[in-house]
Amino acid sequence: MKGTYLGEFEEVVLLAVAIRSGDAYGAAIVTEIEQQMSRSVNLGAVHSALNRLAEKGLVTSALGGVTTERGGRRKRLYSVTAAGQRALQEVRQLRNQMWEAIPNTAWS
Amino acid sequence: MKTSPPRWATRLLYLVCAPNRIDELEDDLNELFYERIESVGLRQARWRYIKDVLSLVRPSLVRPSLVRPSLLRPSLLRPSLIKRQESFYPKQTSMTMLRNYLKIAFRNLTKNKAYSAINITGLSIGMACSLLIGLWVLDEFNVNKGYKDGDRIYFIRLTDGISTSEIMPGPLAAALKKDIPAVEKVTKFTVWSNDFLLNAGQQSSKKTGIYATEDFFDIFQYPVLQGNPSLAIQLPNSIIITRNTAQTLFGRIDAVGQTLRLNNDKYYRIGAVIDNVPANLSVQFDWIVNFTVSEEDWMKTWGSRSFLTYVKLKPNTTQSQAEASMKGILKRYIPDNKEIPVLQPIGDTYLYGNYINGKPMGGRISYVQTFTLVGLLILLIACVNFMNLSTARSAKRAKEVGVRKVVGASRWALAGQFFGESILLNLVAAIVAVLLVISLLPGVNQVVDKHLSIDLLSPMIWFYLVILVGVTSLLAGIYPALFLSAMQPAKVLKGVFAKVSAGATFRKSLVVFQFSLSLFFIIGMLIIGRQMAYIRTKQLGLDRQNIIHLPVEGELRGKMETLRQELQRSNAIRSVTTVGELPIQIGSTTSLNWPGKDAKRDGSVTTMKVGLDFAKTLDIQFVAGHDFGPADTMNCIVNESTVRMMNLKNPVGTEINKGHIIGVVRDFHTSSFHDPIRPLLLTYYPKWTNDFLIKTSPGKMTEALTIIEQLTHQLNPGYPFTYHFLDETYEKLYRSETLVNRLINFFGVLAILISCLGLFGLATFSAEQRTKEIGVRKVLGASVSSIVALLSKDFLKLVLLAIVIASPIAWYAMTKWLQNFTYKIDIEWWMFMLASLLAVGIALLTVGFQSIKTALINPIKSLRSE
């Protein structure tokens, strides 16, 4: 297993998977990120980030059921694993910790 | 307008992406595309679609990774779909297996460090040798190839069908241009070049130059830095100099219009500056002046020859056409002359310079071929080591092969694996070899007198390296690959195979082959070394020891007699003479006439102009008559060969070319031992003096040199004191032989070294295999010496066989080589004896070390484990 360090873009993708939980497939994640962050994202970047996250064990994927929407083909649905959840929380906690460490005088 | 995504982008997606991911990715792309038509418009959506496809072309998506078959729920899939998808899945095995092969290869390398070291050392030395030889050969082939219009430039020789001369009569060049329409340009210059002092203001330097006729720069075109050399050479008061000369004299290259003084004599205006003449061209010079400036009356006659002549043919004229049209040219000017001109393309002159019976018969090319062969052989020896060690040790890997086969490896997969290992090892060896070559090149350049370099940026080198690694990998890997992959798993795993004898015959013949080659090298080294020693020490008929030669230059020319007399007053100097050219530089010939001469004979002799005391200074013995006296200006002295040619009984007193023969000297060598001693005519002509020959008294060399230096400095200020020793000048005649001698020693030692490495490896292996046997023998009372003998015996037999094979081949090759010399040593039986003893000795040392080590092992240790 590769290191569990979470890159910035990986974090964003992981969050998008969590937001769309239950319906997180490639295109949906792209749309989600674009809407949330109003920046354009390449599909390839998202898929390779998903691959990396899967290798780190932070997401898993499974083929979903057949829907008419995709002409009878199935989607690969991603979901955040327990490890993924922990990783996200750790990042958030770290951020908070650092925010709190900023002295009051820094902004004045 | 179409509302579908760009089709080529979709095709690209299908082309590169992992087949198991395509459906999913295409759906994603389509979904995003239709969404984006709504939000940003069709154009933008198509553009984004293309960008997305391009972004998908990345390793992590091209290569399969995410999907694990266990995640598929078969119950959900129609059987037909499963099948389709499976067949589209990329084969993971090839990657994994490759990784496994690499891992096993690496483990094998590190597990047997000694064998790996032997293999890599041997291979890299072999490769380094062949790389070096390759560089040298390439350089040899490039000599004289750099001329513009080189295919139209030819060098002229004259042949009478038996002997061929490259030195032409002076008027031939002009005659060729006038009479032969196929000839566009002709140039000639003297065989000797002039080592003159060039003076410009405060700067002065000695530089070598030639006097050449007008067409010179139309034939040999060099990059021009300034001026127009073709025009400048037309003017008798112009000089053309090279970049180096300009830099030394003027400190810059735009020197046109400056003046310089040549040889402390005439002043010349710089007419043009050209680039330095590349080292790989035969015609070398630092400066050029119009030929007419140096022309003497005798140069205008057909009778004396001292020129090299080059022609440039008109376009679309073939060599044979031109030769046919110049066939009768000599007869037209010299009645009774049977010689005809032969042409040689300038690109061939360096490598194919030998003419026999008027036809080109090789020359330096034979050395080039020999060394190419040597390089290949050394490489082969190194490959043989690899083959030998890997087959010998195959027993150890037989189990691995067995297991692989049982699990389902095909024979070709196994062969591939062993080839792969061979390639891996060879790659490592190649890297070491390149590093070796880079570090050795400065030394090698000194030995071969070249400027070789390995340019790692040129595709040529890489091409060469790839070929080298490819060929050696194939050679080294082919036997293990085919041999090991053919083993039957059932037998191997039962342990039937684990015998030492596997491939033993093959291995033995390889050892014999290696040692035959080494022996060949040893014999070659011995015989070539002896011949070179013979050349250095054989009596030449003249004494070349303790003789200094001193060029006559500058103001010395007017004061030669003063110098001679002053020198003779010193007791450090035994004798002094003057010569027109050094004994080894004689190029001129003349035709003799004497009463009773057969009209059909050409009576050509080489001529040498000498001063007083010539025979005394060089210690040349008289057979009859006496040396020149001051009044003998019309008379001459001949050597024994001339007397034989003229068929005279009482040579002294015979009238010859308007004078008389006053003495006959014993034959002495004037050229290299390749050529027989030719008829020679000495004339007394002190006016034509270019060198002083000074014989010092024994043991007073330093004193003599001081005196000479003082005198020349006094008489000829402004000139640096330059002198040479005659014996050294003689040695320079054998440059290429000395080179061959050095190289054969070098490569011979390497070949032997590599062979020994292989033998050492094999000995180690066989000792290892027989540890138990030796333990048992020792327990039963065998002595150490009997065990050493037992272990060495097998290898000695092979070396003896190699001696039997190599000796006749070496004898044949060496006889061929010695045939190049008119004066040579005899090949004697003891040389082969000595070489054989050496080979046996070397083999015994190599094997013996290992044998003794094994024989000394305490049997308790070797037998304990069972």
Image: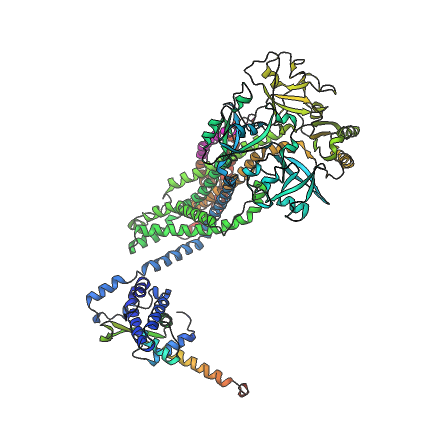
Look at the image and give the residue range highlighted in magenta: B799-823
- Answer with left or right where residue A68 lies relative to residue B227: left
Picture quadrant where residue B95 is located? bottom left
Q: Nearer the viewer, residue B295 or B764?
A: B295
The secondary structure that dominates the magenta segment is: helix
Q: Residue at x 55, y 46 (%)?
A: B441
Quarter of image, res B658: top right
Position above or below: B145 against B72: above
Looking at the image, is A72 positioned above or below residue B671?
below
Residues B682 and B127: in front is B682
Instruction: Say left or right for B14 vs B641.
Output: left
Q: Is residue B803 magenta?
A: yes
Q: Is residue B539 visible?
A: no
| Quadrant of the frame with the N terminus of chain B | bottom left
Query: Where residue B652 appears, x then y in whole percent?
Result: 67, 14
Give percent across and percent down for residue B24.
29, 70
Q: Is residue B687 above or below residue B227?
A: above
State the image quarter where residue B37 is shown.
bottom left
**Of B838 and B61, the residue lying toward us:** B61
Q: Visible in this render: residue B112? A: yes
Q: Position of residue B169 (x, y in %)?
A: 58, 26
Applied colour scheme: rainbow
